[in-house]
Amino acid sequence: MSGERINLAHGDGGELAHRLIQDVFVKAFGHEREAQQDAAIFDSPGTKLALTTDSFVIQPLFFPGGSIGKLAVAGTVNDLAVSGAVPLFLTASFIIEEGFRLTDLKQIVADMATEASNANVKIVAGDTKVVERGSADGLFINTAGVGRVIETTSTPVQEGDSVIVSGSIGDHGMAVLAARGELGLEMDLDSDCACLHAPIEALLNEIDGVKVMRDPTRGGLATTLVEICESEDLEIQLEEEAIPVRREVHGACDLLGFDPLYLANEGKVVMIVAEEVEEDVLQLLKKYKETEESKVIGRVTATTNGRILLETALGSRRMLRRLAGMQFPRIC
Amino acid sequence: MSGERINLAHGDGGELAHRLIQDVFVKAFGHEREAQQDAAIFDSPGTKLALTTDSFVIQPLFFPGGSIGKLAVAGTVNDLAVSGAVPLFLTASFIIEEGFRLTDLKQIVADMATEASNANVKIVAGDTKVVERGSADGLFINTAGVGRVIETTSTPVQEGDSVIVSGSIGDHGMAVLAARGELGLEMDLDSDCACLHAPIEALLNEIDGVKVMRDPTRGGLATTLVEICESEDLEIQLEEEAIPVRREVHGACDLLGFDPLYLANEGKVVMIVAEEVEEDVLQLLKKYKETEESKVIGRVTATTNGRILLETALGSRRMLRRLAGMQFPRIC
């Protein structure tokens, strides 16, 4: 059994594809009926909805702290959550290379089912394609997600607002790079891959004054903040010393010449909140394991200029830009 | 310009990725604002919704009658339509092999935009990943879709109900196989790739008695009907002579030993309707170009047995099974 592998007939819509769906996907995701249908049908969960999609091409498929399966669920759950929505329904689509081990597929699908259950989302529709050996690299997964938008009163960002990050940055990027063996470093570091729906939902329901939320994935904290500053036309000043970075990540970055500000995160949120609720926000976030290390790392210094400045430990200031040039392919 | 190619930095979330999104996707799909966000937000379009997903790995990317872009929109639109929903919102996610030509990507994205406009759906969220040369085969696209379910009165299938197919079968499968040059045949045949939302929406709004709808894609008409018969526990009898097959498809099947019943379709629907509305259904379908060749091809002969029988031209009967064994990889 453990030697069983996916072949092209698992993707042709016929008998073997039918069995794969029944034995692997229906068993794990538990949607007996929908699996046979072309679409899942459900009652609309609210008046405003959010819709998102992500494809995952991470290498390696299993890494410290997670797998492509866990990541594919958490990534889409988090995209919905930071958009102010309660994640509810996911789709899952698999592109599998011929010869892929069935045991690995089952493990990855089990990881998806576990993470979906943790996040209270249902995987309601799916698809499987198989391509010839050499036409893909093992496995790619796409998830799309639908959520119910939590109605909140929106207030514009203003000077003095606080920038909060929910914990240490760069863990995912560095853990995955280390797992590839490309760094020549042995590290005891897990990816931060996790679903953030619970603290974010609590925050939106309990506290007014959360103005912007984003998950700093590809491109890292710096790129995400550049995008926020440009699209909202804000000037933000970050304090380098306030930004939480694990010792292992710091050390490896120093050795290798990486900047943790540009490393990917898969279980972090960065937000802009009104200064007067800063303490309430931190108190709430610290109740949840995923966000217990939340910290204020900077402040909105103007509602113009569209730029982000980093005040370094030495007191100098530099402007941050988007990640430029190929640094870390296939990190998610 | 025409020699410009995708490189890994187009997928890393940084500056080049930002430009690719702005220059290619935002320009074609026209969602200025959402492109910067983690999810698209929209008012819930109805009380019951449908959600579906499909990944497309078709080879070649351009084929007579369409491209992977047209197919990626039509495929998901049709999955929603045959589920009884009006297709409204799509997501589009791209996995691109390093070195892919930018002009090809732009053409494919333009095809998606055209087809989405034809089908009255909006592409509201997206994602782009780039993998190293050799880790994918050119381009894979995933689309997920949300639709508003049309409320209809559902009546159970019963003996005597009519089985209707909306036109000739096997065109897509044969056109794509021929385009690969694998058959050693030159054929003047287009894929049937098309959106069927318009005739299906009209049907559901105007006629009571449409009981089952499916699009016979991978695995062909036979596999789709086997799935219907098994899941609904029906016995269907098809008349081989009544099933529309183009002369070119028939000829090539005869030469190559293929069965058109197992060839993929990408612009056809098969349905079970009450016998008393059969004429009304055909009349309505014939008003639309995509379904103008609709025909009754068989009948429900029992609401038990879970099997499908084919009455051949010679008067013999055989039971149809799912497509078994690898026949046509990467047909969609």
Image (cartoon, coloured by chain):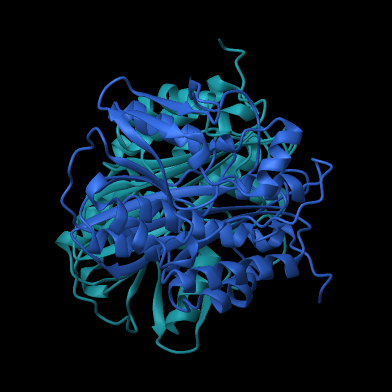
Chain colours: A blue, B cyan
Which residue shows up at 38% across the image and 63% down it? A199
Q: In x, y percent, where is residue B45?
A: 20, 55
Residue A104: quadrant of the picture? bottom right
In this view, the residue in front, A148 or A176, is: A176
Vertical comparison of A302 with A72: above or below? above
In this view, the residue in front, B83 or A128, is: A128
Q: In x, y percent, where is residue A53?
A: 44, 49
Q: Is residue A256 left or right of residue A125?
A: right
Number of numbered discs on residues: 0
Q: Give the quadrant of the N terminus of chain A.
A: bottom right
Q: Is residue B79 left or right of residue B314?
A: left
Which residue shows up at 62% across the image and 33% down it? A259
Q: In x, y percent, where is residue A77?
A: 43, 58
Residue, far front: A314
In this view, the residue in front, B264 or A119, is: A119
Which residue shows up at 43% across the image and 33% down it? A238
* Res. B115 in view: no
* Res. A172 in view: yes
Residue, far top: B1
Vertical comparison of A198 with B246: above or below? below
Vertical comparison of B304 with B33: above or below? below
Q: In x, y percent, where is residue A221?
A: 49, 39
In this view, the residue in front, B180 or A270, is: A270
